Amino acid sequence: MSETERVKTGIKGLDELIEGGLPRGFSFLLLGGPGTGKTTFGVQYLYKGATEFEDGGMYVTFDEPPYSIAGNSERYGWNLVEQEKAGKIAFVDASPIKSAAARTATFVPPSLGQSFLGGAKFNIDNIVAAIKEVKQKVNAKRCVIDSITALTLQYKDDFEIRQQTLKLIKDLTEMGLTTIMLAENPEDRQDLTRFGAEAFLAQGVIVLHMYRVEESNVKALEVRKMRGAKHTDRLCPYRITAEGIEVYPEETVFRSV
Amino acid sequence: MSETERVKTGIKGLDELIEGGLPRGFSFLLLGGPGTGKTTFGVQYLYKGATEFEDGGMYVTFDEPPYSIAGNSERYGWNLVEQEKAGKIAFVDASPIKSAAARTATFVPPSLGQSFLGGAKFNIDNIVAAIKEVKQKVNAKRCVIDSITALTLQYKDDFEIRQQTLKLIKDLTEMGLTTIMLAENPEDRQDLTRFGAEAFLAQGVIVLHMYRVEESNVKALEVRKMRGAKHTDRLCPYRITAEGIEVYPEETVFRSV
Amino acid sequence: MSETERVKTGIKGLDELIEGGLPRGFSFLLLGGPGTGKTTFGVQYLYKGATEFEDGGMYVTFDEPPYSIAGNSERYGWNLVEQEKAGKIAFVDASPIKSAAARTATFVPPSLGQSFLGGAKFNIDNIVAAIKEVKQKVNAKRCVIDSITALTLQYKDDFEIRQQTLKLIKDLTEMGLTTIMLAENPEDRQDLTRFGAEAFLAQGVIVLHMYRVEESNVKALEVRKMRGAKHTDRLCPYRITAEGIEVYPEETVFRSV
Amino acid sequence: MSETERVKTGIKGLDELIEGGLPRGFSFLLLGGPGTGKTTFGVQYLYKGATEFEDGGMYVTFDEPPYSIAGNSERYGWNLVEQEKAGKIAFVDASPIKSAAARTATFVPPSLGQSFLGGAKFNIDNIVAAIKEVKQKVNAKRCVIDSITALTLQYKDDFEIRQQTLKLIKDLTEMGLTTIMLAENPEDRQDLTRFGAEAFLAQGVIVLHMYRVEESNVKALEVRKMRGAKHTDRLCPYRITAEGIEVYPEETVFRSV
Amino acid sequence: MSETERVKTGIKGLDELIEGGLPRGFSFLLLGGPGTGKTTFGVQYLYKGATEFEDGGMYVTFDEPPYSIAGNSERYGWNLVEQEKAGKIAFVDASPIKSAAARTATFVPPSLGQSFLGGAKFNIDNIVAAIKEVKQKVNAKRCVIDSITALTLQYKDDFEIRQQTLKLIKDLTEMGLTTIMLAENPEDRQDLTRFGAEAFLAQGVIVLHMYRVEESNVKALEVRKMRGAKHTDRLCPYRITAEGIEVYPEETVFRSV
Amino acid sequence: MSETERVKTGIKGLDELIEGGLPRGFSFLLLGGPGTGKTTFGVQYLYKGATEFEDGGMYVTFDEPPYSIAGNSERYGWNLVEQEKAGKIAFVDASPIKSAAARTATFVPPSLGQSFLGGAKFNIDNIVAAIKEVKQKVNAKRCVIDSITALTLQYKDDFEIRQQTLKLIKDLTEMGLTTIMLAENPEDRQDLTRFGAEAFLAQGVIVLHMYRVEESNVKALEVRKMRGAKHTDRLCPYRITAEGIEVYPEETVFRSV
């Protein structure tokens, strides 16, 4: 237990901010508003894991269907279909959207998704069961939950949200997965970031900010919390480039060099 | 799936901000307060589609009746009645307002609308069924929902709003439509923009802002999110001119050249 | 349908802001806090309509009784009693206040009002029936609803407010009336103006603002939205003078010439 | 009905702001936070009415008992007990507080108060009945309600508050009383004045403000609304002096001469 | 009733701000956030009353147990145990906390407290009965309620809070007590001070503010309201010294001399 | 009772701010957002207590499992496993997360935790019973509750939260423990710190702030309240160093020396 093993995120510039990577075996929260690149972050984490660090990965999606995630990833040169065929990345498809295109695509999502929309509510136990099953196939060590918001929205009660989130984290931890849970942050613009139970329960919290500086939107990443890791407390600018997300630890956010 | 096909919006100055147009086959959110020109945006998208890009289009309206939309569009030189006769644009009329004028107009709305006000609530399945039916007639490739707010207001629960929005997006996607969903943003002035589930679920989000600069209202368009497209993150001024909405990517909002 | 006919408001300086007047046959929202002159605006619209533009008019009042409205209008030289006798203006009196003075006044309000207070809730259908009946007598083309707030307050649910507002607008439209709906805006001072469903559903929205500039209250009119009309987006100062409301499109609000 | 009769308030400096006084026969709202002098304003209005303008008056109190109001008024030289004996001012005591002192005082409150605390809720009809009865004895022309807040607090529903307030105003109007309704404004400090139904329903609204200017509290009176009267729209400083409230229309609030 | 008798607070510097002291026989509100010294203020008021002004006193506590209050008071040199033995100060102990230390201490709280925690809710009648009983023993003229917040928190409804507060004030008044009711003010920092029913019902309101000036917390006392007493409307700095609370009427808060 | 005994916190720089340490035998609140170091503070308090001040300690955890807390503490050189074996520190494990690693670790948490997740709600009585039992084994004098938020979240009602918090504090006090209760503060960034019942009921309140100064997050500790102790009212910077939390009473927060 002494030396914590690190999981390289594959996000250029990020690992050096957190002592080399995410502490292996825990769950982390990635908070951001629409357009901040949460999904890109999640896919990059898995794709780099599979292609550069020999880690299998799973993408659990509640909203956007796998074929769409895969399609949008192509612009960064990440071929998820290829990785899936190679048995290195798998999707748990809990998204209710199945386009005609998707149905004829070579990219076949696991059969789980279809059943979710029928029932009124997701069930953490079912989700976990599906994750366990799919995990075997790709020997996954990394996991992305897109999004924890979609999952907890069904609970009305702060107490129940806390209990269910703890339960999910517990199960992911027992499976030995290093998980990034994407979370929607609807009001970041005003810098009114409100942290819910997830932020307190997760082992670490990374926030993707978007500021309007005059007429531009400037993006900045903040490592808000990282248990068991010395981490910077500076805001670091990031951009979504043709190669994916890049963080610039050396640059400043508000007066760019 | 490699090269995403683009749908030209017909909004002058907008397409160049989003790599040539909206990614075909997805749903997008257009957010704005009263008076920002959401309806004009929607009509322009369909009219230009029909007259310049050979795309049939459908306008699904829950509030303002088709004859009124058509009447107000004339000021821009857009003859919707003509397009309807030519079988290029169709309305799904879920608006409860039928004026005497409307009843005698050559512009005959589909019979769907009348029945909605009778029942207590809209039904997504009925709406989708009507869209499917009308879509055949005009071979529609573009769709405008005016407004998603009217549709989701009947649901009390964030979870249900999310589920129903996902269901609608799923069905529109399966029909192959490229859809703009108009959404009411009642508090933009204070810049406390709240993005709900719709913003997270849509493939892209365009926001129409209105700022009071001294004694004038200045309008600015923001591409907040556009999955699968590199897009500007600048605020771009726009105006509602005699030819419709025009965006000025080269100008600045707060210190106009 | 090509050239929209315009209804002159009779508010000095306003018509030129909206291409000559309100588009005939639609419903408009007039939003303002206490003391901004909403009632004066409404009476002036009807009185000028009757005396200068040959339009009969109806004033539907839910709070202030007709005799009081008539009494307060005298200071502007508007004799409503005279107009009522001449069959040019009529009241639909849904106000619960009947003073002794009122009962002996020559000004006899329609018999409708009394019954409203008895029942727990107003009924849109009854209101519309009364409007229809009274409309015949004065051949009304203009209508003022004072206030839409009083009418919608009984509904708890945003969805129902929307439905009922749509129903009212629909019925007023079918009767061919050009209607101004007064609405209470309880928080204008802080500029926290909240536009509800009414603002999105109305064909146009005019806001009466009141700002404290040092120790004075400065009034300013804003045409927030006007479908089918090119309109200014400047804040225009207005005053309540001995001749009623006057708007000054040439002046500035915050640095008066 | 032509020339509205004016009721002199007896507040030095105020009448000249509102064309000579309050329009006779209507109800007005006086809004202020704790410590702004609402009760002093109300007592002064009645006392000056009785001693200088030959108007009988009634003070309806829901919170502070008559003996306490009378005791605190002595510091201004206003002897209410004397006025009560002379049959010029009467109290309707709906306050639940009866001190030993009060019971032995020469100042005997009407018997009404006691019964209120017993029942769970005030009843507008009972209040009105008591007002009617007491009104006969002193031939009251002026009335103070202290406070409308205490009266409407029992209603949970905005619609019911509106209906009950209208009913009260209607009954006071029918009795020919010129009434000042005191209202608690809990958040004035931040200038977040929120106007409730009372402000929209009353014939006039006067607001007592309190500003912190550096380390002092500065008081300012605003005539926010006054139907049927031309009124100033300036903030006027006021002070609570040894002679009661005095308004200084010639002075400025923030840079005192 | 003519000359109001004054109760010296024993707070250095305060009495001169309010014409010599609190008007005898009434109830006052002391509002403050955590750490502003409310309890110290209350104890000082009683201790000085007992030792310097010959007034017996009672401390009614709902949260902190008497032994703890007594222990913390020692740092100011106030020996409450001594005063209790001398029959000059008594506690009504409604606190649920009884430490082992407390049970063996010479300081024996009245037997009332124990029973409260058992029942689900406090009962104003029981509290008042206990106050009456204990009052006899020490011939109390002063009373501190710590806190009115603890007492009213059990009521969900603004109307009921108002009624119960009135009832308590009424009973305290009938007993002839001059009472300070401590109240928790959780958001003073933002200066969004909300004054509830208690502030309107009490005879006077004193607010303890805490401002962050750069990196220090500056304390300031404000006499917000004091019926029947001319009082300063300046913010006065205060400090918690080794002798208790001291107010500095001659100093300024933000630019200390 | 005269001289209050002090408990040294072991947080470098803190004790001198509060007259040498926390008053022994009471409960204190430590408020902070995610990433402010609350858990580190709690562990340091116990570890230093056990290794430097001969005080046994207990860590009651509702969220993060003991093995994870222990693992993260190693980076500061604090070997909790060693201390547990030596019988100086014990965990009450009410966390629902048990990783495979944890199960095989030498670090065996008490059997209490497992049962909690099964039941719907925590029970203060059960928690207290467990604390009592474990307290015997290590002769604990110090206690950390991580977190009071997790415990009170199950209560919907402010009154019940207050009662339950009082009950817990009462029981901890009776056991003679000096307790630090960690509390989550979800909105610190905007300085909208809301102090709930816990802050008013605790004997002292320490707040961990995090400010964004340009692009860095600056941390500052505030002793907001400390009954029975003279304490600084300055904001003091602190950092999380390789040796744990260090407070710098001599430095300034916003213009670091």
Image (cartoon, coloured by chain):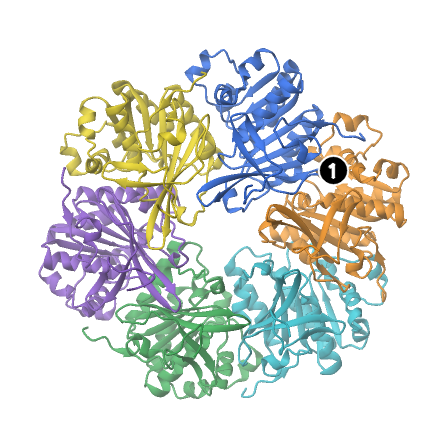
Chain colours: A orange, B blue, C yellow, D purple, E green, F cyan
Spot the residue most to the front: B257
Residues E165 and A28: in front is: A28
Give the percent coordinates (x, y) of residue F257.
64, 75
Is the N terminus of chain E in the top left, top right, bottom left or bottom right quadrant?
bottom left
Give the percent coordinates (x, y) of residue D50.
12, 57
Left or right for A148, reference B70:
right
Residue drawn at the location 61% of the way across and 71% of the way down: F255
Left or right for E56, reference C86:
right
Residue drawn at the location 78% of the way across and 29% of the way down: A102
Left or right for D244, reference B229:
left
Give the percent coordinates (x, y) of residue E75.
50, 85
Q: Please, is residue D54 above or below residue E203 in the view?
A: above
| Residue E114 appears in the picture as rendered | yes
Residues D77 and B45: in front is: B45
| Residue A119 appears in the picture as rendered | no
Left or right for B117, reference D98:
right
Residue bearing mark 1: A94
Mark 1 neighbour class, 10 Å CA radius: few under 14, some 14 to 19, many 20 or more: many
How many labels, in total?
A: 1
Residues F113 and C179: in front is: C179
